[in-house]
Amino acid sequence: MLPGAPTADIRVRSITSRSTATPVVKLLNGLAVPAVGCVPTDHPWFGTPLQDQGTSRRGQKLLAEAGYGGKKLKLKVAIRPRARARCIR
């Protein structure tokens, strides 16, 4: 996170984490799926995760509080094309 970036504010991060799943999947040309839990929906451990109860009004309120009410929010997304998966031990 860069200082001065919109995502430096927890309110902006909170609402963007809930609302960017579909646009990010489109940005990645379908190489991703929106997460609905800790494991993929076709995994045997997938259960019934809690659904986000957020509303668009709540999101608009958070953005307004952060100073982005009525403004277009622009974010830069960095994608590493040849990233290697790594295990953290």
Image: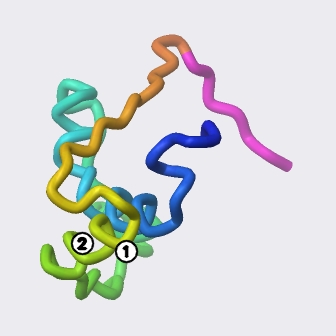
- The disc at residue 25 is none
Q: Is mark 1 on a helix, strand or loop?
A: loop
Of residues 48 and 72, which is closer to you in this image? 72
Classify 85 as above or below 12. Answer: above
- Whether residues under marks 2 and 1 lie with C-beta atoms below 8 angstroms apart, the answer is no
Name the kind of residue labelled 1 in the image: Phe
Residue at 23% in and 28% down: 27
Dot 2 or dot 1, earlier in sequence: 1
Label 2 to label 1, Cα distance in Å?
28 Å
In the shown orientation, is residue 9 left or right of residue 70?
right
**In this rendering, would 29 be left or right of 37?**
left
Please state the horizontal and vertical placement of residue 67, each as a whole percent of the image. 35, 60
Whole-percent x, y for residue 21 in the image: 26, 51
Q: What stretch is highlighted in magenta?
A: 83-89
Residue under numbered circle 2: 59
Q: Say which of marks 2 and 1 sits in front.
A: 2
Give percent across and percent down for residue 35.
33, 59
Type of the residue with mark 2: Gly
Residue that badge 1 annotates: 46
Magenta residues, dominant SS class: loop
Displayed quadrant of residue 59: bottom left
SS state under label 2: helix
Colour scheme shown: rainbow
Please name the residue shown 28% across and 81% down the image.
52
10 Å crowding of disc 1: few (<14), some (14-19), many (20+):
few
Residue 29 vertical position relative to residue 65 in the rendered view, above or below = above
The residue under the point 27% across, 27% down is: 28
52 to the left or right of 45: left
**Is disc 2 surrounded by few (<14), some (14 to 19) or many (20+) residues within 10 Å?**
some
Can you say whether 35 is above or below 27 in the image? below
